[in-house]
Image: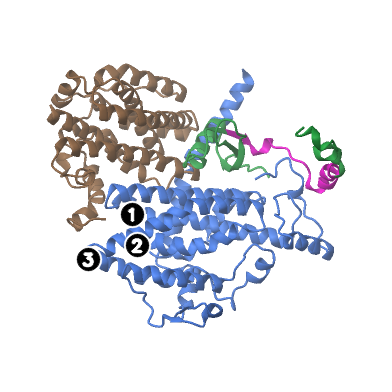
């Protein structure tokens, strides 16, 4: 947060048409908006919501994979997984920092997450019962996330774009380690291959849901596109993901759990693309609204870390205050 | 926007290597400057990003007012005589 | 000789793996996000050192076993880590103190290793000493803040000292294998490291307003393979996949 000692962030400009037009002209000229620039309240709120959700997703996302750190089957896999889950924490941290430039504190955002007021990516409300899930998450979930995140590096809000550049740079190993892991299962015993297929069956549809509701139902898309916070629609990104992922599955001998999946020459303006089956949006909304298998466990785990950590944070603050007094007295 | 109940916020600057400037890379929370430097090391230098760290309490940063950008920065735009290309010298002089 | 060396390297390899395992349990559950990054950094250092050491053990043994065979496929009696490193995380006070106790020993250990005669271990020591020096610093700062923070944190820190101090004596224990290594200049003399360890701990405890307890009843046994009850549970997680899918590669 840069707002201390700065003037712009705490006062809200009058949002007359001239102001909104001038703001839109900056956006259209691909100028970056920086923390203390005047901005419409709705732009600020959209960013706080989006960056907050994104940060929460990274933090909650540590849990399903973290579940396997102590059980990773080889030391090589263990260090890769540990480094990856640690990265997710780092990404959450960069993103909270970006949101803090808009005048909302990390504590406030954390409390919104714990109270259920703030959302995070629903994908993390699915369980990771097998080791193969660690590979599948890296391959599909990180793969889908990258599709979403690469365009965000060009987001009109400077701190978000900068955080995303760092995130994307670090993410690049995540999808590769996931795919490599799944590939090694496919090259292993029949049990291992079955484990990989079972995992793909469970994660394929939820990862398609990660791109959000279809464009026809998406409540935030239009304005976000206009403000260049988002650069592609949910359906565009989803299609890109399907087209990229299906051949990757074929290459390692796995099949997608979708009988309606087939190549369509006409798609993507004649370049071809995959048609795929109907997504179960009822399931999507059920999980978004808190009724997935792991929703309650995820929040409970975050709550536990936050509450049980309070005495540690309090101690550090108390020590800092004492040190300040001691220095002043000396 | 001080964060009364939370930990203070720190801005982190990393120097990629000696000879370069420290560059702002992001921020983090820590109770004091010692912990802020350690956290910066753990958060922002995991991939050999640098060899030196500065942390500054965000509250101690003072910035120019964006509403005064025009009066602060636009006046420099027509002072072309500050740049070498403003001056004509004979080609025979060569590089100067 | 190589039998003694193998068994002694295995002790420190196990120390690093088991402590790395414990520290890794914090990832995603730390008291603040910054520590969610610091804890895995330390765990990665420790597991990285364990890998180098197991690889060396495998080479010394020369029977084609791998780092994973040693890390995953032994019975509990065959692990030779000291008991300190297998103790449960309990809370953040226990965790940073356990790490400090261990790192305050390993730092002078690796420094002394620089002048020992085994080339592989000397190489490992040069990398490891930098990592462990940071662990002393980071955990030391936390011990100071918790010890001299609030009344609650001071009490928790005090409890952690009482709980863990009895396990520190084992760091300095010298069994026959290690004695042979020390005699032939392959390993530093653990007991000679005691003053350096004590001085680090005293210095930090003074700032943390903590008293160093007298160890009247030290707890040992790990170097002989006799572990606490927590250890079996740790192994059941660590080894789960390797035991459930024998011979599979991952």
**Distance of label 1 from label 2 (alpha carbons):** 9 Å
Q: Are marks 3 and 2 on the same chain?
A: yes
Residue B71 lies in the magenta-colored region: yes
Instruction: Give the quadrant of residue C174.
Output: top left
Marks 3,1: beta carbons within 8 A: no
Magenta span of residues: B54-77
Protein chain holding label 2: A
Q: Position of residue C82 (x, y in %)?
A: 24, 33
**Distance of label 3 from label 1 (alpha carbons):** 19 Å
Q: Are marks 3 and 1 on the same chain?
A: yes
C230 displayed left or right of A118? left
Please, what secondary structure does the residue beneath circle 1 have? loop
A106 displayed left or right of C215? right
Label 3 neighbour load within 10 Å: few <14, some 14-19, many 20+: few
Chain B shade in the render:
green
**Label 3 sits on residue:** A191
Marks 1,2: beta carbons within 8 A: yes
**Which residue is located at x 34 percent, y 21 percent?**
C197
Protein chain holding label 3: A
**Label 2 sits on residue:** A133
**Distance of label 3 from label 2 (alpha carbons):** 14 Å
Q: Earlier in the sequence, mark 1 or mark 2?
A: 1
Please, what secondary structure does the residue beneath circle 2 have? helix
Main secondary structure type of the part rendered in magenta? helix
Please, what secondary structure does the residue beneath circle 3 have? helix
Label 2 neighbour load within 10 Å: few <14, some 14-19, many 20+: many
C41 relative to C177, above or below: below
Q: Report the chain shown in blue.
A: A
**Label 1 sits on residue:** A68
Residues A21 and C195: in front is: A21
A34 relative to A224, above or below: above
């Amino acid at each position: 947060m840069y707002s201390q000692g700065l003037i712009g962030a705490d006062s809200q400009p009058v949002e007359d048409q001239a102001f909104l037009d001038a703001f839109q002209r900056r956006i259209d000229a691909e100028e970056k908006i920086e923390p203390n620039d005047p901005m419409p309240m709705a732009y600020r709120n959209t960013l706080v919501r989006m960056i907050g959700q994104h940060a929460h997703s990274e933090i909650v996302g540590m849990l399903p994979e973290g579940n396997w750190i102590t059980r990773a089957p080889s030391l090589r896999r263990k260090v890769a997984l540990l480094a990856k889950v640690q990265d997710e924490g780092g990404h959450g941290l960069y993103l909270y920092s970006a949101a803090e430039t808009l005048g909302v504190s990390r504590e406030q955002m954390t409390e919104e997450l714990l109270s259920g007021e703030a959302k995070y990516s629903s994908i993390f409300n699915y369980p990771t019962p097998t080791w193969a899930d660690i590979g599948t998450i890296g391959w599909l979930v990180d793969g889908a996330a990258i599709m979403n995140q690469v365009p965000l590096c060009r987001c009109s809000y400077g701190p978000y774009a900068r955080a995303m550049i760092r995130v994307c740079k670090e993410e690049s190993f995540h999808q590769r380690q996931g795919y490599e892991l799944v590939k090694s299962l496919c090259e292993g015993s029949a049990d291992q291959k079955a484990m990989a297929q079972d995992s793909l069956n469970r994660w394929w549809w939820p990862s398609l849901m990660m791109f959000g509701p279809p464009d026809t139902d998406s409540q935030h898309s239009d304005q976000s596109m206009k403000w260049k916070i988002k650069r592609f629609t949910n359906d565009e990104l989803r299609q890109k993901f399907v087209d990229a992922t299906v051949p990757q599955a074929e290459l390692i001998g796995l099949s997608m759990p979708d009988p309606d999946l087939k190549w369509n020459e006409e798609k993507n303006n004649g370049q071809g693309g995959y048609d795929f089956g109907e997504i179960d949006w009822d399931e999507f909304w059920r999980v978004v609204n808190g009724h997935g298998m792991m929703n309650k466990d995820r929040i409970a785990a975050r709550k536990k870390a936050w509450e049980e950590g309070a005495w540690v944070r309090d101690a550090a603050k108390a020590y800092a205050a004492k040190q300040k007094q001691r220095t002043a007295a000396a | 926007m001080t964060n009364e109940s939370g930990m203070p916020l720190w801005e982190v600057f990393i120097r990629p290597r000696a000879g370069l400037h420290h560059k702002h890379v992001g921020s983090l929370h820590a109770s004091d400057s010692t912990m802020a430097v350690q956290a910066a090391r753990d958060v922002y230098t995991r991939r050999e990003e640098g060899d030196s760290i500065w942390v500054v309490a965000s509250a101690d940063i003072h910035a120019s007012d964006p509403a005064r950008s025009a009066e602060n920065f636009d006046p420099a735009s027509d002072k072309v005589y500050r740049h070498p290309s403003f001056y004509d010298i004979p080609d025979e002089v060569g590089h100067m | 000789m190589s039998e003694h060396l193998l068994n002694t390297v295995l002790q420190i390899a196990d120390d690093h793996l088991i402590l790395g395992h414990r520290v890794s349990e914090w990832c995603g559950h730390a008291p603040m996000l910054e520590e969610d990054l610091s804890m895995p950094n330390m765990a990665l250092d420790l597991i990285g050192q364990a890998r180098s050491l197991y690889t060396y053990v495998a080479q010394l043994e020369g029977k084609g076993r791998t780092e994973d065979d040693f890390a995953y496929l032994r019975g509990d009696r065959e692990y030779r880590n000291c008991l300190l490193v297998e103790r449960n995380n309990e809370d953040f006070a226990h965790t940073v103190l356990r790490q400090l106790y261990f790192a305050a020993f390993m730092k002078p250990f690796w420094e002394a290793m620089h002048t020992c005669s085994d080339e592989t271990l000397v190489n490992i020591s040069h990398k490891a000493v930098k990592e462990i020096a940071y662990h002393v610093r980071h955990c030391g700062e936390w011990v100071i803040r918790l010890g001299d923070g609030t009344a609650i944190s001071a009490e928790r820190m005090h409890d952690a000292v009482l709980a863990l101090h009895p396990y520190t004596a084992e760091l300095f224990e010298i069994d026959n294998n290690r004695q042979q290594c020390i005699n032939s200049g392959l390993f530093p003399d653990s007991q000679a490291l005691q003053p350096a360890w004590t001085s680090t701990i005293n210095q930090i405890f003074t700032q943390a307003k903590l008293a160093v307890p007298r160890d009247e009843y030290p707890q040992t046994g790990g170097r002989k393979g006799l572990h606490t009850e927590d250890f079996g549970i740790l192994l059941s997680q660590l080894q789960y996949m390797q035991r459930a899918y024998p011979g599979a590669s991952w």
